[in-house]
Amino acid sequence: MSETVIADEQVQLVDPYNRPCGSASRVMMRRLNCWHRATYIVVRNVKGEICVQQRTSIKETHPGWFDLAAGGVVAAGEASRPAARRELFEELGVRGVELISGGEFVFREAGLNLYGSLYWVNYGGPLCLQPEEVAAVRWLSIPEALALEKATPDTRMALSKAIDFDHW
């Protein structure tokens, strides 16, 4: 059995109105269910399929589940767009693509309190998976992705918000 790993990083904390109010380690943010910011990047290929990531078994939340978007927490002092670019490169090896903004949303469920910044990209090149976070990827239609039983709730909400836009 693998041991759960929580990345040692400083996370930008916000108040319930999305105003910056300091930082904390990721461990402390999770332990205290602090409000924070996160990015969500839906990656779409030319067929209109999206890249679905299977999380590794050592992720601190929802190990082995599916992420319907790339992304992650915004680091202390970091803005959302640079955080999205960083996460997209770290998780999938994708860079140099246009990030299309899809707005923001609030996610509050099971002790996870966050303001999500939504982006999507069109991408058809090779992927380089981050072995600590991404066990595998598959390309699925949006209905197939939303039908996955073990999709993380926050990325499910992000994808649902993304399809509300005319760009889909």
Image (spheres, grey):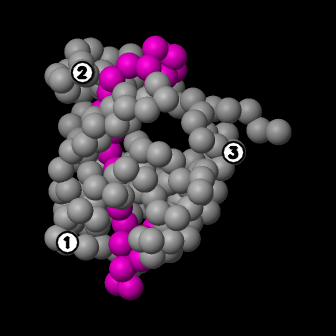
Between circles 1 and 3, the one closer to the viewer is 1
Residues under numbered marks 2 and 1 in contact, where contact means CB atoms less than 8 Å apart: no
Q: Amino acid at mark 3?
A: Ser
Closer-to-camera residue (126/109): 109
Q: Amino acid at mark 2?
A: Pro
Mark sitting on residue 167: 1
Q: Position of residue 14 (x, y in %)?
A: 25, 22
Mark sitting on residue 16: 2
Closer-to-camera residue (66/157): 157
Quadrant, the C terminus: bottom left
Could you tell me how far apart the alpha carbons at marks 3 and 2 are, in whole angstroms?
Answer: 31 Å
Magenta range: 26-51
Residues under numbered marks 3 and 2 in contact, where contact means CB atoms less than 8 Å apart: no
Residue 127 seen in this snapshot: no
Could you tell me how far apart the alpha carbons at marks 2 and 1 are, in whole angstroms?
Answer: 30 Å
Dot 2 or dot 1: first in sequence order is 2
In which quarter of the view is residue 73 placed?
top left
Q: Amino acid at mark 1?
A: His
Q: Position of residue 69 (x, y in %)?
A: 41, 56
Mark sitting on residue 57: 3
Residues under numbered marks 1 and 3 in contact, where contact means CB atoms less than 8 Å apart: no
Dot 1 or dot 3: first in sequence order is 3
Label 3: state its secondary structure: loop
In which quarter of the view is residue 154 placed?
top left
> Vertically, is 151 above or below 49?
above
Q: Position of residue 131 (x, y in %)?
A: 61, 52
